[in-house]
Amino acid sequence: MRKIDLHIHTSCSDGIFSVEEVLDLAEKYEYDEIAITDHDTIEGYKKAREIMKVKKYGFKLIPGVEISCSQKNQDVHMLAYYFDTKDQRLLGLLNSIQNGR
């Protein structure tokens, strides 16, 4: 059975571990795939990609983000995966959400 975690936060949002610590823990516990889904930012994912260019890990990193939304005056957090990490519309939306806090 494959070991996968698709909802991980780093210190780039409200997580307690740095990006590198998350990667090292995923390796230690032998995950096959992970997604860093920080709140309204893909900085953790981007840092992870840079680290993984230098340090080799045995798992796949999936692009992810947790987007803060509201529906009928209720806070909703939507998880998104496998998007274009250079899409200016998405990056603009995430920036707007961050600035609106």
Image: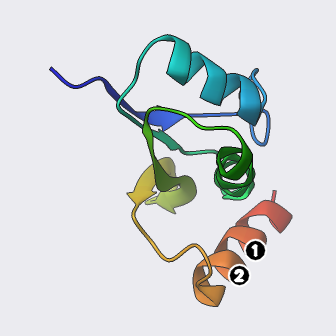
Cα separation between marks 1 and 2:
6 Å
Q: Residue furthest bottom?
A: 88
Q: Residues within 10 Å of mark 2 (few under 14, many from 20)?
A: few
Q: Amino acid at mark 1?
A: Ser
Q: Is residue 17 above or below residue 43?
A: above
Quarter location, residue 46: bottom right
Q: Is residue 57 visible?
A: yes
In this view, 23 is above or below 87? above
| Residue at screen point 63% across, 45% down | 38
- Residue nearest the observer in this picture, 74 or 36: 36
Which residue was labeled with disc 2? 92
Pointer 1: residues within 10 angstroms few (<14), some, or many (20+)?
few
The residue that mark 1 highlights is 96
Viewer-proximal residue, 76 or 3?
3
Q: Position of residue 43 (x, y in %)?
A: 74, 56
Name the image quarter holding the C terminus. Answer: bottom right
- Pick out the residue farthest to the top: 29
